[in-house]
Amino acid sequence: MALTTWAGSRNHEGLLRKMRNSKTIMRVFGLTALLVILWTTALCAQKMVVPVKLQLAILLKALTYDRHLKEKADGEILVAICYHQEQKQSVEVKDELLEATKASLDSIENIPLRFTSVDMQKDDLAAVITRQGVDILYVTPLSSAVAESITAVSREKKTTTVTGVPDYIKSGVAVAIGIKGDKPQIIINLPAAKAEGADFSSELLKLAKVIQ
């Protein structure tokens, strides 16, 4: 009986140790997960350094320096906002952009301006560009892989890409709005812009940070 009791006690102690170890593992895992979430959130928050309304105004002004824009526009300039329905920040930026466009943003160089949106989760971007005659693609905060898939299509379709996420210049987006000091900065990936059919004047290139 004593042996049984001792064995049972030993089993319980072993179980308790496993439980304590399990709790420790879970605490470590929980802390790690929390740190990952906080780090990811911080990165997302840092991606867009200029408010949406301001960057939109700057981007639209920059587009007026594209000598090929009027040639590509067929009666109107259509800007498609590329977003992902499952990514909160992407949806928020898309909604904010569409709201901002209601405030007298109706033309570029006297060419009517219209906005639409493309859900990268379910829409065929190439088909949308062809069907609707999209001239400009605005890339919201997405994964780098999705951004690169967008630029692959934009080069094929000769559609200029713009964004408020400076890092997407590395993914092949043509024009981004970043910040230098305390002022917004236009960043141009010149090879990407040319591959998409844009021809920005030297006036704009002198004002921008140009990536060769």
Image (cartoon, grey):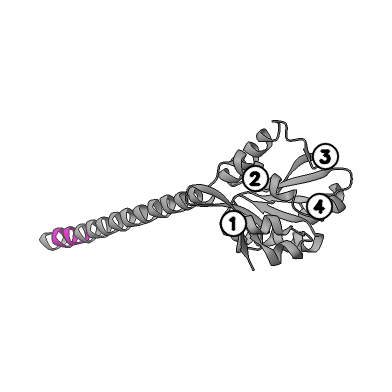
Q: CA distance from mark 3 to mark 2?
A: 17 Å
Comparing 189 with 146, the one in front is 189
> Which amino acid is tagged 3?
Asn
Crowd band around label 4 with a 10 angstrom C-alpha radius: few (<14), some (14–19), many (20+): many
Residue 25: give x, y in percent of width and height: 32, 58
Crowd band around label 2 with a 10 angstrom C-alpha radius: few (<14), some (14–19), many (20+): some
Q: Is residue 124 left or right of residue 167?
A: right
- Return the residue at label 4: 69
Residue occupying the point 81% across, 59% down: 157
Comparing 183 with 133, the one in front is 183
Residue occupying the point 64% across, 58% down: 206
Q: Is residue 195 magenta?
A: no
Q: CA distance from mark 2 to mark 4?
A: 16 Å
Residue 15: give x, y in percent of width and height: 25, 58
- Return the residue at label 3: 110
> Which amino acid is tagged 4?
Leu
**Along the polypeptide, which appears first: circle 3 or circle 2?**
2
- Return the residue at label 1: 143
Residue occupying the point 42% across, 53% down: 39
What secondary structure is marked by label 3?
loop
Secondary structure mostly seen in the magenta stretch: helix
Question: Do the residues under discs 3 and 1 have CB atoms within 8 angstroms?
Answer: no
Task: Identify the disc placed on residue 58.
Answer: 2
**Image quarter for residue 160?**
bottom right
Which quarter of the figure is the C terminus placed in? bottom right
